[in-house]
């Protein structure tokens, strides 16, 4: 059970002066139940990469397969691929179109040809998943909601498909810190309760460092790093700055403290734990010096 | 996908044709189009064809791309050719049933198709070698005498500039919305016409909303920079006629002369 990309390359507008490579010989395997963060600066190819995961783009070279079957072999296959791999685009609220929130979230399930009861049930549970009260919003026009709520409705529209893999492209773009934390908390909860794989694309290291178990760093159309975030931050041979991304604030603080000879574990992530660790390390230092 | 469409697209370059003043390019293109109608025999059509080949060569635009511009119009081409082929009265060459092909018909079909192809090619060449901004700028300048008649020339040109500017943006947006709805299981390529039209709603509604939002933002941005159209505006790129334009004009005059000669000879 996995999505597998084998040596895929993708070129935009081949044969014109606007021709541009976006991916070069990328191979990747995503298993069920993983939480993967994809990070890279603007134009590094991350959005292009994820659009291959549900067959929206067809690679110029290489193959994409889901559970061992090539996505582009039969046209019918793509429909089930898109049900299994849910995709939330950047600014997903821009795709809302129905008169009521309920109908908009129901668009996906209805396309699957489900019965009315099933649709209703899926819509309600999807809205609950993203922390919206069905009674409050279901009958309202999506265009009368706040920005954060619109985004959640749009995400619910994808969750209602009950995908096995959920791909989110910059889900926090344009939200205030509060809205961002809420969205991520819900994604994390969804990941824990539903068991679906989550692929999170962002250029913000803070977001993924805390949540992702596996991190991909993209740069110049290629994957430059694939592994646990902790490995990335402590691999001295990798210059993150070259990839246009920076260390999370917590990690760079801990590294600086270590550099100033404070005995502290710089692999910690959780803020409260870090505060406690710094406090005790300072105490140890004071005790030993006097 | 959608963004791959060649829509009278500007093809950046640095050739003789690219560097011509857009005003002279427009006027010369119009002259050229008129002069096509002077042609009335195979040799003159051939001359016009050679002239177009010359422009393509000088402009440095790949022949494949130039030819691609004919593709969207091939049905019209085929229809025109067929109508001329079968409907022109004259000496019959082949006949079966009510249909008959005449010698005059063949001539008409070939020449009309050539005329259409030339029209398409020359107008695509104009847009291939001239950026939309330069084009509207030139149109504004060419139409400026009409200001005396209280015609809002500057405003019209501004509207064209903005419209052209947003064509690629809206295409990109459409592409994105289509993908987002496809990700939710929407299907745009099957079903009958009514079904397909219904399937467009999930694209059109978000597209209109975003177009209005963009228009609003643009208006605010222009307002914030104190935009007031028309009078006393200066330009970053002043249009100026140069030697290039004189040379290009000369070639067109020669073409017209040759075509006139081929049509009437020196006797007229």
Image (spheres, coloured by chain):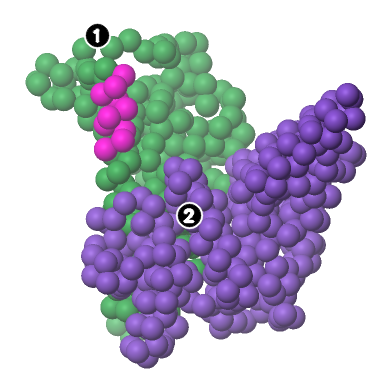
Q: What residue is shown with label 2?
A: A182
Q: Is A285 on the left-hand or right-hand side of A127? A: right
Magenta-tinted stretch: B216-225
The subunit carrying tag 1 is B
Q: Colour of chain A?
A: purple
Badge 2 density bin: few <14, some 14–19, many ≥20, Cα 10 Å: some
Q: Secondary structure at mark 2?
A: helix
Q: Most prominent secondary structure in the magenta stretch?
A: helix
Q: Tell me the residue at 69%/57% (across/down).
A: A212
Quadrant into which the C terminus of chain B falls? top left
Q: Is B85 on the left-hand or right-hand side of A197? A: left
Q: Secondary structure at mark 1?
A: loop
Q: Is A123 on the left-hand or right-hand side of B69? A: left
* Image position, residue A64 (x, y; %): 71, 70
Q: Tell me the residue at 60%/68% (across/down).
A: A191
Q: Closer to the observer: label 1 or label 2?
A: 2
Q: Is B51 on the left-hand or right-hand side of B78? A: right
Q: What residue is shown with label 1?
A: B232
**Residue A39 seen in the current view:** no
* Image position, residue A228 (x, y; %): 79, 55
**Residue B249, picture quadrant:** top left
The subunit carrying tag 2 is A
């Amino acid at each position: 059970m996995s999505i597998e990309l084998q040596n895929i390359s993708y070129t935009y507008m081949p044969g014109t002066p606007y021709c541009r490579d976006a991916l070069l010989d990328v191979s990747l395997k995503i298993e069920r139940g993983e939480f993967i963060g994809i990070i890279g600066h603007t134009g590094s190819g991350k959005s292009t990469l994820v659009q291959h995961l549900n067959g929206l783009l067809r690679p110029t070279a290489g193959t994409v397969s889901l559970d061992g079957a090539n996505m582009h072999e039969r046209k019918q296959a793509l429909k089930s691929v898109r049900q299994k791999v849910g995709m939330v685009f950047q600014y997903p609220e821009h795709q809302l179109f129905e008169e009521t929130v309920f109908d908009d979230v129901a668009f996906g399930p209805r396309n699957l040809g489900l019965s009315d009861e099933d649709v209703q049930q899926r819509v309600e549970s999807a809205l609950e998943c993203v922390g919206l009260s069905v009674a409050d919003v279901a009958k309202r026009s999506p265009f009368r909601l706040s920005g954060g709520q619109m985004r959640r409705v749009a995400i619910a529209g994808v969750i209602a498909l009950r995908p096995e893999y959920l791909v989110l492209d910059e889900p926090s773009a344009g939200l205030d810190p509060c809205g961002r934390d809420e969205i991520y908390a819900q994604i994390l909860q969804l990941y824990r309760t539903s068991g679906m794989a989550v692929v999170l694309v962002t250029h913000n290291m803070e977001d993924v460092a805390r949540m992702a178990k596996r991190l991909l760093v993209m740069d110049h159309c290629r994957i430059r790093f694939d592994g646990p975030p902790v490995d990335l931050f402590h691999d001295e041979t990798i210059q993150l700055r070259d990839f246009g991304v920076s260390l999370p604030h917590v990690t760079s603080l801990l590294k600086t403290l270590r550099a100033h000879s404070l005995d502290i574990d710089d692999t910690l992530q959780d803020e409260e734990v870090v505060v406690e660790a710094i406090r005790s390390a300072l105490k140890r230092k004071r005790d030993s010096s006097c | 996908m959608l963004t791959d469409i060649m829509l009278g697209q500007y093809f950046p370059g640095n050739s003789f044709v690219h560097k011509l003043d857009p005003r002279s390019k427009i006027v010369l293109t119009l002259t050229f189009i008129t002069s096509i109608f002077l042609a009335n025999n195979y040799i003159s059509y051939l001359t016009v064809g050679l002239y177009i080949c010359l422009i393509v060569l000088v402009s440095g635009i790949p022949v494949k791309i130039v030819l691609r511009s004919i593709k969207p119009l091939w049905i019209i081409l085929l229809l025109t050719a067929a109508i001329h082929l079968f409907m022109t009265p004259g000496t019959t060459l082949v006949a079966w049933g009510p249909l008959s092909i005449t010698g005059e018909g063949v001539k008409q079909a070939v020449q009309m198709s050539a005329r259409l192809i030339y029209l398409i090619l020359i107008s695509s060449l104009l847009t291939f070698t001239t950026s939309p901004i330069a084009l509207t700028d030139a149109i504004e300048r060419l139409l400026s005498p009409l200001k005396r008649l209280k015609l809002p020339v500057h405003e019209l040109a501004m509207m064209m500039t903005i419209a052209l500017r947003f064509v690629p943006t809206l295409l990109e947006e459409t592409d994105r919305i289509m993908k987002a709805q496809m990700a939710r299981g929407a299907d745009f390529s099957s079903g009958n016409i009514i079904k397909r039209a219904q399937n467009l709603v999930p694209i059109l509604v978000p597209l209109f909303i975003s177009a209005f939002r963009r228009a609003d933002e643009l208006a605010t941005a222009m307002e914030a920079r104190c935009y007031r159209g028309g009078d006393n505006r200066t330009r970053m790129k002043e249009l100026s006629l140069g030697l290039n334009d004189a040379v290009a004009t000369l070639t067109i005059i020669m073409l017209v002369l040759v075509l006139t000669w081929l049509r009437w000879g020196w006797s007229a």
